[in-house]
Image (cartoon, grey):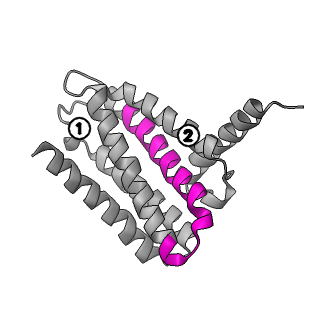
Amino acid sequence: MMSPMQTILGQWLFSLKQYISMSLFLSSPERLPCNRYCTGLTILTYYLLCLGLVDEERGFAELAAHLTLELGLLALFVYTGLRWKKSMARFQQTFSALVGVNMIVTLASILLYRIDTGYENPLENPLFYLLLLWNLAVMSLIFKRALDIPVHLSAMIAFNYYVVYQFILIWFYW
């Protein structure tokens, strides 16, 4: 018989596999276990992953604030969309999917950030924009499947999430 902790870790490892599959457009949120502990472990892992981005310019407190903002906005967008569609039962899986996929894309960006590409500013690197488009496309797919809406509407939601997030970050630094 498995202990509850083994069950949670097993479900979380399955979730990680699904996050990677979703990042490659091969899966959808309904395949994730509906377990708040798995979502909590994903969020904890995401915060620990931010340690890979700490450098002379950005400390962990700043990165954690950005991540907290990102998670809050994701939760708000998911809540609003699912409330609009009257399907709040999908919240746990949809939020977990978005957090997990963003975590996978962040891992890819950390690997890209750590590789010396010859660009002093990461915003000058064309791969940065490819990662951004990839992330928005995956988020759009998750919104499409979770909210059962057309692709163009889910793409608009993902893009609006990104724009709101960027405006809040600009406001942060103003």
Quadrant of the image for the N terminus?
Answer: top right
Q: Find numbered disc 1 in the image and state the secondary structure of the residue it sits on.
A: helix
Label at residue 18: none
Q: Name the quadrant containing residue 110.
A: top left
Label at residue 40: 2
Percent position of residue 126, x then y: 27, 46
Residue 99 magenta-drawn? yes
165 with respect to 101 (left or right): left
Q: Name the quadrant containing residue 64.
A: top left
Residue, x 23% and y 28% (percent of image)?
58
Percent position of residue 59, x then y: 26, 25
Q: Amino acid at mark 2?
A: Gly
Q: Against 1, is 131 above or below?
A: below
The residue most toward the right is: 1
Q: Considering only order in the chain, which callout, 1 or 2, is on the residue closer to the N terminus?
A: 2
Percent position of residue 154, x then y: 44, 71
Magenta range is: 83-110
Question: Who is closer to the viewer here, 92 or 109?
Answer: 92
Residue, x 69% and y 51% (percent of image)?
33
Q: Amino acid at mark 1?
A: Pro
The residue most toward the top is: 56
The residue where tag 1 is placed is 122
Question: Who is closer to the viewer here, 171 or 124?
Answer: 171
Q: Against 65, is 69 above or below?
A: below
Q: Find numbered disc 2 in the image and state the secondary structure of the residue it sits on.
A: helix
- Counting the numbered discs, the total is 2
Residue, x 57% and y 36% (percent of image)?
41
How far apart are labels 2 and 1 at the CA level? 30 Å
